[in-house]
Image (spheres, rainbow, N blue to C red):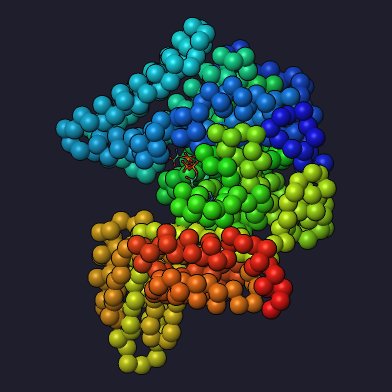
């Protein structure tokens, strides 16, 4: 066990040396006394902590006064910040910045000036409220004012040229993470922790093809990020979760929630012992705890399960995060800023022993065993589903081919049309002349209508809106005879009409499309039947 009150020990193999191969370039700025490259603490393992925007907005005192500090005796901590949201993400700084960008494009509009001022005041107010040292406060205020002045000039220039490219939008969005880091670093300094502000905005120097954001790209990023972070010496790096310049733009290529990925890549580059994603929920539950009263906290979950859950509605962590960290065999732990002593949920692979990691290291035996030996009460061998999730706001498209002959080319035409309008398909079910697709309606409605119009040249198209995808996820489900039968008969008994079924594309997920208005009820009955009494369910499958 380590000295920290908040964490339990991790397997010895996860305590690793500092990365020696980082070769990226950092645009880091000194905060305070400058960098110290002394060897202080170099033996301590790296721990990467990512804090979401609403956590920084609401719980900055706990983060800077308790959470970060409690790990300093045992770890070299890296703090990665999202843009602040003082109420909810929808009213947060990133959304305000995107609103300002849109308003700057309206000729003659001065709304963006007001938005910049709101952002400025929000951050100045946070600094004033929480920082007691006049010197530190003055420095943070100057930094906030400078960032906001630059932002305003940038938006004014954009209005003159009447253009905001995807790259410019990224530059605008980056201000959110910079301001957030200024405040967090200032508060930590105020509480006696030496910090260094690290801006990842200009770290990517190599040119990558937008169509080729492959593993080489992510490996490059993790090296570059680690290089920037490891220049901080004994200071705690406070790192912008924004990183640029991603080919095709960060917003388009990675999407919102990119800070999780930044933290994951830093953890990989530093060979960290753990990546902690701090949220306002105790971890990953058997169902959304806001919607299912009896949802249980899961102490461990595999990355595959976590990915399925995030893609299908339980967006606890950005889906790209898992693969990167897991490739490097680094556990991810979801923890709650409102309950820092809680163990959280650990996301960790259950690969067989002796698997070689990409850097050639021979990994020790499977995680659950190793973790158990080290004091965790974890078990990945559950013989019941792991969780149920719903994704709302889904559209279903049923297309019936108007061809009278063989159907080749039918699917190709459909997918090229969807591609043209940037529409992603969540679920699919087909016959030779018929296709049903569930589409996550995060797409632009106008684009969707245009795509549907275009698809009508291929066949008859029926559209159903206000649908939801219900997914039952579990690593062990492939071995559970009759589980889909139980799922669908449970739904039938509750009077839930099933529009479409998809099973088999992923061995660990059974999904169906239902009416959105029945989604919460459906999730609750499935939870009650298949996830509440897990002892009984396991026994049932043992008997089968
Ligand atoms: N299976 C699940 N386990 C935990 N949280 C879930 C799950 N499904 C959905 N959620 C929701 O995801 C949200 C994630 O936590 P939160 O920190 O509040 O989000 P954000 O970082 O987006 O502000 C929670 O509000 C929770 O209700
Ligand atoms: N600020 C960004 C990045 C992010 O990761 O946010 P959060 O960690 O609060 O989900 C966004 O709003 O998308």
Where residue 419 appears, as percent x and y from the top left, is 38, 65
**Camera-side residue: 22 or 533?**
533
Q: Quadrant of residue 232?
A: top right
Which residue occupies the extreme top position in the image? 134
Residue found 43% across the figure and 14% down from its top = 128
Which residue occupies the extreme left position in the image? 108
**Camera-side residue: 417 or 73?**
73
**Screen quadrant of the N terminus:** top right
Where residue 218 appears, as percent x and y from the top left, is 59, 48
**Camera-side residue: 91 or 98?**
91
Which residue occupies the extreme bottom position in the image? 405
Relative to residue 252, is residue 431 depicted above or below?
A: below
**Screen quadrant of the C terminus:** bottom right
Q: Is residue 30 visible?
A: no
Residue found 42% across the figure and 49% down from its top = 252
Q: Is residue 348 visible?
A: yes
Where residue 118 appears, as percent x and y from the top left, is 31, 25
Relative to residue 39, is residue 51 depicted above or below?
A: below
Where residue 541 appears, as percent x and y from the top left, is 68, 73
Task: Give left or right: position of 294 versus 544.
Answer: left
Residue found 60% across the figure and 43% down from its top = 334
Task: Give left or right: position of 124 versus 273.
Answer: left
Relative to residue 173, is residue 307 depicted above or below?
A: below
The count of marks equals 0
Residue found 26% across the figure and 26% down from its top = 113
Relative to residue 109, is residue 464 depicted above or below?
A: below
């Amino acid at each position: 066990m380590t000295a920290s009150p908040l964490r339990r020990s991790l397997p010895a193999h996860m305590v690793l040396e500092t990365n020696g191969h980082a070769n990226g370039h950092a645009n880091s700025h000194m905060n305070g006394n400058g960098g110290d490259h002394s060897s202080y603490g170099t033996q301590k393992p790296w721990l990467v902590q990512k804090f979401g925007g609403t956590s920084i907005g609401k719980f900055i005192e706990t983060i800077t006064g308790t959470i970060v500090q409690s790990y300093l005796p045992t770890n070299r901590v890296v703090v990665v910040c999202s843009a602040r949201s003082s109420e909810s993400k929808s009213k947060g700084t990133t959304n305000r910045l995107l609103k300002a960008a849109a308003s700057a494009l309206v000729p003659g509009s001065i709304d963006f000036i007001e938005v910049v001022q709101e952002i400025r005041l929000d951050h100045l107010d946070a600094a004033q409220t929480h920082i007691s040292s006049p010197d530190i406060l003055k420095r943070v205020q100057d930094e906030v004012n400078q960032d906001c002045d630059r932002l305003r000039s940038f938006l004014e220039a954009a209005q003159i040229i009447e253009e905001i490219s995807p790259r410019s939008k990224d530059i605008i969005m980056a201000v959110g993470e910079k301001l957030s880091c200024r405040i967090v670093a200032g508060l930590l300094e105020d509480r006696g922790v030496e910090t260094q502000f690290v801006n990842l905005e200009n770290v990517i120097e190599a040119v990558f093809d937008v169509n080729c954001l492959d593993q080489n790209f992510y490996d490059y990023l993790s090296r570059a990020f680690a290089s920037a972070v490891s220049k901080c010496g004994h200071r705690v790096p406070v790192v912008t979760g924004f990183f640029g310049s991603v080919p095709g733009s960060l917003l388009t290529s990675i999407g919102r929630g990119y800070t999780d990925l930044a933290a994951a890549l830093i953890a990989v580059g530093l060979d960290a012992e753990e990546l902690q994603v701090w949220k306002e929920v105790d971890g990953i539950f058997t169902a959304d705890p806001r919607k299912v009263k009896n949802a249980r906290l899961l102490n461990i979950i595999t990355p595959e399960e976590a990915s399925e859950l995030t893609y299908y509605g339980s967006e606890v962590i950005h889906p790209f995060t898992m693969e990167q960290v897991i490739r490097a065999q680094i556990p991810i732990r979801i923890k709650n800023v409102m309950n820092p002593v809680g163990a959280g949920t650990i996301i960790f692979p259950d690969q067989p022993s002796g698997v070689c990691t990409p850097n050639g290291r021979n990994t020790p035996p499977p995680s659950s065993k190793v973790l158990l030996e080290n004091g965790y009460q974890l078990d990945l061998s559950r013989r019941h589903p792991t969780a149920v999730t719903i994704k709302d706001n889904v559209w279903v498209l049923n297309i019936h081919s108007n061809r009278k002959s063989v159907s080749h080319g039918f699917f190709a035409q459909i997918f090229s049309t969807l591609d043209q309008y940037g529409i992603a398909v969540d679920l699919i079910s087909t016959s030779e002349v018929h296709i049903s697709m569930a589409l996550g309606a995060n797409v632009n409605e106008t684009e969707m209508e245009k795509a549907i119009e275009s698809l009508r040249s291929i066949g008859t198209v029926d559209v159903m809106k206000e649908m939801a995808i219900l997914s039952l996820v579990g690593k062990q489900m492939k071995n559970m005879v009759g589980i889909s039968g139980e799922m669908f008969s449970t739904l039938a008994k509750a009077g839930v009409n099933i529009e479409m079924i998809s099973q088999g594309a992923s061995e660990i997920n059974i999904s169906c499309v239902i009416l959105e208005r029945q989604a919460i009820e459906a999730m609750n009955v499935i939870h009650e039947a298949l996830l509440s009494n897990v002892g009984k369910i396991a026994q049932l499958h043992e008997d089968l």
